[in-house]
Image: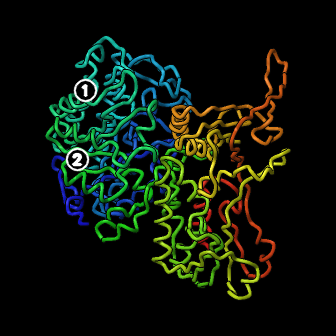
Amino acid sequence: MEYRNLLSPYQIGGMVLKNRFVVPALATNYGDANGNITKKVMDYYITRAKGGYGLIVIEVVAVEPIGRAIPNQLGIWDDYFIPQWAEFIDELHKYGAKVAIQLHHAGRQCAKENIGGQTPVAPSAIPCPIRKEMPHELTIHETYSIIDQFATAARRAVNSGADAIELNGAHGYLIAQFMSTYANKRIDEFGGNFDARMMFPIKIIKRIRREVGNGVPIIFRMSGEEKVAGGRDLNESAVVAKVLTDQGIDAMSMSAGVYDSLEHMSAPSAFPPGHNVYIAEAIKKAVDIPVIIAGRINYPQLAEEVIRTGKADFVAIGRGSLADPEFPNKVAGGSVNEIAPCIGCLQGCMGYLFDKDKMKISCLVNPFVGKENEWKINKANDPKKIIVVGAGPAGLEFSWIAAKRGHQVICYEKESVVGGQFRIAGIPPTKNELLNALVYFKTMCDKYNVQFRMNTEFTKEMVRVEKPDSIILATGSEPLIPEIKGINNPKFINAIDLLDSKCMVGENVLVVGGGLLGAETADYIAERGSRVSIIESKSSIVFDCQGYVRKYLLERLRSNEVVCTVSANVIEFLENGVIYETTTSKNGIYTSSVKTLDGFDSVVLAMGSVSYNPLYNEINYAVAETHVIGDAFIVGKAITAISNAAECAISI
């Protein structure tokens, strides 16, 4: 396929971009607590500039400290920042990329802990449904002060060498809050009707124009649909876009959602690729300026089609630029099969926002995110013969990186296909895109001549035959079977075997275990017409899953009428069900009761996993070097297993 349209130059105002690829603003949290640009920030963006993107929009940049959404958000609220921004932008320009700085104020969508204990501000004293903190309602004077902050921030950006300014009027942040009846209940010059709600962004645009002139392109980012009750719909957004165009905006950058509809901001794999393209198409009909569109445009074929058909003028490759910073170069170079795909898992790109111990953006498919200048795939000084046991994601990731470094890599896999349990994870409804990661890993293994021994279980006797220098054990995990009376009934079915089509279930099924595996197995069974119940010892199900992936899965389970029994500790398995114990508390007095849940045709076990590593003690002393990686080392998320594998591969 040709990508003539995708690779063609185009203009935003007077700014000529070399292609239609845009890196949209993604909050990395790689700055420091004072808003400074760190080396990690620079390395991250320079890598994407080298990768061939025409426009790089540098993430949410705070126009004042109280407007920060995340702890280490970059800042531009003082002239102090200009020299570091100038140095940063100059580096990006060396690789042919144009640079826009996105000016941002979180408004009510921030936490006190991120803004030094201060109270968030908003158009109206209405809490963000997610943050739940009561904001301070801005006075008229305070509102004008923030307008000035946007304007002076724009002046600093231009003085630093930025090619364009982007205003974040999307995703429920402050500008969006003023524009939407969802958050703005004012009755004054900044609220009460459509024209008044538009006054805040209009005044910001006018002040910026007075500050920087008409020659600097201004891009306006907006959610075409906010996807919440009382939020803006697409018809109103088309009118908004026309008003903004009349005020001198040079391009519209379209997205969807707010914090309370987060799944539309960064959609999981349950959403189809290009799910927002209809928004761009509608906005294109309303305005005569370029339109940028974001939203799971993961594949170059889709991106080319969007541009070719005129539905948008630019494609924003956000999470795709995390997965593969070389996306544009690979398209231009004819290596599209080597593009590392975004699979919509959200483990690193959004999961970090819910992990206070981490709070740095990362990527399951690309463990080098945030380590661009720390982890290097350099040629090995001492090439080795390496045996990898297991072709799951950890084994595959290790194999291609080690082979690229010049090692001879032989990968043993006892099954007929690669992927391990990650392949199984791609079987439940809406999860099939996970398999694209395995295709990518296998493609890279083939490129670097990894040898595969399929349908072959590696044994200690093979060490003497192969005579490897190193052995990597990536044997994954196996189902946890706790010591509970009656659990070893041969009629019971393991969830992994069920998903792998190794067995069938009846019309009325009990799934024991309500973590992600159990819940997705229940979804899989229910979609095929069986009645399904889940029993779980914890107080909720899908507790081991990123927030709105969980939300979407729970909605599917409800729609399929899956019955959930929680806070229920199974104490005995019956032929067709379980006996379980529950504990309730009233006035400090705990009461336990024992109940029976039975009458099922099939019982499916999804009670967790334990590391499977039978070879280590047998072969550890037979070779000079042995490493255990992935779930074989410690059971966890795939993102951890793959990162662990990559780190091992670059250091061996």
Q: Pointer 2: what residue?
A: 312
Examine the rendered structure and indicate whether residue 296 appears above or below residue 122.
below
Q: Secondary structure at mark 1?
A: helix
Residue 523 location in percent, x, y? 56, 42
Residue count near mark 2 (Cα–Cα under 10 Å), binned few <14, some 14–19, many ≥20: many
Q: Residue at x 25, y 24 (%)?
A: 198
**Does residue 379 appear to the left or right of 578 in the view shown?**
left
Q: Which mark is residue 433?
A: none
Of the pair 259 and 341, the residue shown nearer to us? 341
Residue 401 location in percent, x, y? 53, 72
Q: Residue at x 16, y 40 (%)?
A: 214
Q: Pointer 1: what residue?
A: 236
The answer to whether residue 31 shows anywhere in this view is no
Q: Amino acid at mark 2?
A: Ala
Q: Does label 2 or label 1 sit earlier along the sequence?
A: 1
Q: Distance between the Cα atoms at labels 2 and 1?
A: 19 Å
Of the pair 366 and 125, the residue shown nearer to us? 366
Of the pair 465 and 467, the residue shown nearer to us? 465
Examine the rendered structure and indicate whether residue 185 appears above or below residue 535.
above
Residue 595 location in percent, x, y? 80, 28
The answer to whether residue 614 shows anywhere in this view is yes
